[in-house]
């Protein structure tokens, strides 16, 4: 009776019963630009997790001060074959890199390469042809106050998104004695541990940076590596020379703008693949076959998987005309790669050559040297205080003008039999020397 009376009063008062929504499709009011940007991006973001060994500073001096911790971070798919860009500190020291995709699949990744100074790394996950690379924008036209969205894995909460604005540009941020971020974006979007390596995207859903660091103890202050810088480093880490062992014989630069990035040829190696194919300095490469090229990363990606002797069709713009050129890929001599690997393993150094004209700027009586671009933490070189920017000019009694010199020294009986190893560097035009103790088993 009471229920019947209640229904009668509802009818008499003209009240309407509660009905379900007419449609499960979201209205245009709910599909805001932020929602659309996240929908466009989130499928290209992965979560990275694994265990790593770290040094516990609180227990220093009390014996073994190493401990296992659970690491976490994020990454972005930059190639449908499974190549993922992230921060190096996310995967450093992780023996089993586990990656969870947006569809909840978990796979094991392999570290391809890394760049210590910029804290960037490329890993590769298995691909079944269903991976979606992220849409890449540009950091050349960013505006203060522009809306941005950070996506990542903060505190293990996968697929999290937070909105904010660009607070400042061109920040130089020291992290510790061995690490600093240069020319980074400052944002107040919520970025926490686990967001590292994930994307910062604009309101169009285009990646404009890689989230890298937060300011400890401060709220609303986080830093992001600009996407134009990140893509240039990714191109080096994913070069066809490193990944596939083939050489295209050219050097180029990205020219990013709000109208789209263009890849411009700067130098062509005499007698190399590009030279024989008719490529000239100043050409703008637009396609490799049907694959569009906007950046050096696109050019390298288009060649990955090819082999020595393969023919590729390259489209270029030259003096307002579109030309199609045929190039036959050369093999890369693996000796230099093997030497670089040994230098990193034994000495803890990553070196790059210095041209004669550039070395003359150092105003020294030495004939040449190799520039230090990275130093492995807790390596023999790090223990001696060698740092990026130093010039290695000699070891033992020999010069180190090029990698052939370094290879000779590392393979010499004197290197294998002597301890410690005397080295010579230039720092701020001042020659310095030291004695490096190496690990056993040289």
Image (tube, rainbow, N blue to C red):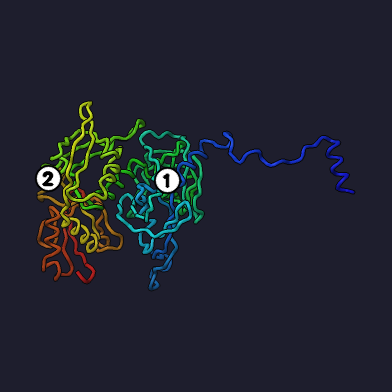
Give the distance between the C-alpha atoms of the residues marked 1 and 2, in whole angstroms: 40 Å
Instruction: Give the residue furthest to the top.
Output: 320
Give whichever of 326, 113 is nearer the camera.
326
Query: What's the residue at 49%, 43% (across, down)?
Result: 189
Residue 312's label in the rendered image is none
Q: Is residue 175 visible?
A: no
Q: How many marks?
A: 2
Q: Position of residue 20 (x, y in %)?
A: 69, 42
For disc 2, the marked residue is 356
Q: Are marks 1 and 2 in contact (CB under 8 Å)?
A: no
Left or right: 245 in relation to 216: left
Position of 358 relative to 28 (above/below):
below
Query: What's the residue at 12%, 53% (across, down)?
Result: 401
Give whichever of 275, 140 is nearer the camera.
275
Q: Position of residue 371 (x, y in %)?
A: 20, 51
Query: What's the residue at 57%, 34% (across, down)?
Result: 28
Q: Is residue 322 visible?
A: yes
How would you rate the neighbour count of disc 2 (Cα within 10 Å): few for under 14, some for 14-19, many for 20 or more?
few
User: Quick one: label 1 or label 2, which is nearer the N terminus?
Assistant: 1
Left or right: 291 in relation to 43: left
- Residue at disc 1, secondary structure: strand
Left or right: 346 in relation to 85: left
- Quadrant of the snapshot with the C terminus: bottom left
How would you rate the neighbour count of disc 1 (Cα within 10 Å): few for under 14, some for 14-19, many for 20 or more?
many
- Residue at disc 2, secondary structure: helix
Give whichever of 288, 118 is nearer the camera.
288
Query: What's the residue at 19%, 42% (across, down)?
Result: 250
For disc 1, the marked residue is 199
Between circles 1 and 2, the one closer to the viewer is 1
């Amino acid at each position: 009776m009471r229920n019947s009376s209640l229904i009668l009063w509802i009818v008499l008062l003209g009240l309407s019963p509660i009905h379900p929504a007419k449609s499960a499709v979201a209205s245009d009011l709910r599909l805001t630009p932020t929602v659309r940007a996240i929908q466009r991006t989130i499928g290209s973001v992965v979560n990275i997790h694994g265990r790593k060994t770290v040094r516990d500073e609180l227990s220093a001096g009390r014996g073994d001060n190493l401990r296992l911790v659970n690491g976490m971070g994020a990454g972005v798919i930059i190639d449908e074959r499974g190549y993922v860009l992230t921060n190096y500190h996310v995967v450093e020291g992780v023996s089993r890199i586990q990656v969870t995709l947006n569809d909840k699949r978990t796979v094991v990744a392999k570290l391809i390469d890394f760049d210590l100074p910029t804290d960037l790394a490329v890993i590769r996950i298995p691909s079944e042809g269903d991976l979606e690379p992220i849409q890449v924008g540009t950091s050349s036209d960013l505006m203060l106050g522009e809306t941005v969205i950070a996506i990542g894995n903060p505190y293990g909460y996968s697929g999290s998104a937070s909105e904010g604005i660009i607070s400042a540009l061109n920040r130089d941020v020291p992290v510790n004695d061995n690490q600093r971020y240069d020319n980074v974006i400052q944002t107040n979007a919520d970025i926490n541990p686990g967001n590292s390596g994930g994307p910062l995207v604009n309101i169009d859903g285009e990646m404009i940076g890689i989230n890298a660091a937060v300011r400890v103890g401060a709220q609303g202050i986080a830093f992001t590596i600009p996407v134009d810088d990140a893509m240039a480093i990714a191109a080096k880490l994913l070069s066809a020379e490193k990944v596939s062992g083939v050489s295209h014989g050219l050097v180029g630069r990205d020219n990013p703008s709000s109208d789209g990035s263009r890849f411009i040829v700067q130098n062509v190696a005499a007698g190399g693949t590009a030279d024989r194919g008719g490529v000239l300095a100043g050409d703008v490469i637009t396609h490799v076959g049907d694959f569009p090229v906007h950046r050096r990363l696109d050019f390298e990606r288009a060649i990955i998987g090819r082999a020595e002797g393969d023919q590729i069709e390259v489209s270029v713009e030259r003096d307002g005309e579109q030309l199609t050129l045929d190039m036959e890929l050369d093999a890369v001599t693996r000796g230099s790669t093997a030497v670089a690997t040994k230098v990193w393993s034994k000495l803890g150094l990553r070196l790059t050559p210095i041209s004669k004209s550039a070395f003359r700027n150092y105003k020294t009586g030495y004939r040449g040297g190799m520039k230090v671009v990275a130093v492995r933490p807790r390596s023999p070189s790090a223990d001696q205080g060698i740092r990026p920017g130093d010039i290695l000019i000699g070891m033992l009694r020999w010069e180190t003008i090029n990698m052939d010199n370094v290879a000779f020294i590392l393979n010499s009986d004197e290197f294998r039999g002597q301890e410690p190893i005397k080295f010579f560097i230039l720092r701020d035009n001042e020659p310095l020397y030291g004695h490096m103790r190496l690990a056993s088993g040289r």
